[in-house]
Image: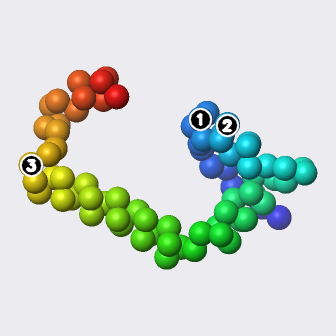
């Protein structure tokens, strides 16, 4: 079987390791997660977050692009 490589941040990797047990592979962990959360549920969640962001932008709650670096430093 051919495999693909995916890049994840160190934090994501550390979290993903917590889901492994009894010799599971990361592939098995991800497949189990995808069985639990359907594509529709996942995309519904993403769209809900997007709608909230759009409402904030429409209400004038947004950051100008030239202020973005400074705003990210404060996170």
In the depicted structure, whether residue 50 falls above or below residue 22 = below
N-terminal label among 3 and 1:
1
Secondary structure of the residue carrying tag 2 is helix
Residue at the image position 11 percent from the left and 57 percent from the top: 58
Q: Distance between the residues labelled 2 and 1?
A: 5 Å
N-terminal label among 3 and 2:
2
Q: Residues within 10 Å of mark 2 (few under 14, many from 20)?
A: few
The image quadrant where one finds the C terminus is top left
Q: How crowded is mark 3: few (under 14 residues within 10 Å), some or many (20 or more)?
A: few
> Which of the pair 6/43 is nearer the observer?
43
The dot on residue 11 is 1
Q: Count how many numbered circles sit on residues in the image.
A: 3
| Observer able to see residue 69 | no
Q: Position of residue 15 (x, y in %)?
A: 65, 41
Residue at the image position 74 percent from the left and 57 percent from the top: 29
In the depicted structure, whether residue 61 falls above or below residue 47 = above
| Observer able to see residue 43 | yes
Secondary structure of the residue carrying tag 3 is loop
Secondary structure of the residue carrying tag 1 is helix
In the depicted structure, whether residue 46 falls above or below residue 70 = below
Q: Is disc 2 in contact with disc 1, using a CB cutoff of under 8 Å? A: yes
Q: Is disc 3 in contact with disc 1, using a CB cutoff of under 8 Å? A: no
Q: Mark 3 points at which residue?
A: 60
Q: Is disc 3 in contact with disc 2, using a CB cutoff of under 8 Å? A: no
Q: Position of residue 24 (x, y in %)?
A: 85, 53
Q: Is residue 49 left or right of residue 33?
A: left
Q: Mark 2 points at which residue?
A: 14
Q: Where is residue 52 in the image (x, y as percent from the top left)?
A: 27, 58
């Amino acid at each position: 079987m051919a495999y693909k490589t995916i890049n994840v941040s160190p934090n994501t990797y550390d979290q993903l390791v917590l889901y492994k047990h009894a010799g599971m592979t990361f592939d098995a962990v991800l497949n189990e997660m995808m069985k639990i959360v359907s594509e529709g549920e996942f995309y519904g969640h993403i769209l809900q977050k997007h709608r909230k962001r759009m409402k904030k932008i429409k209400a004038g709650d947004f950051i100008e692009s030239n202020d973005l670096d400074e705003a990210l430093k404060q996170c």
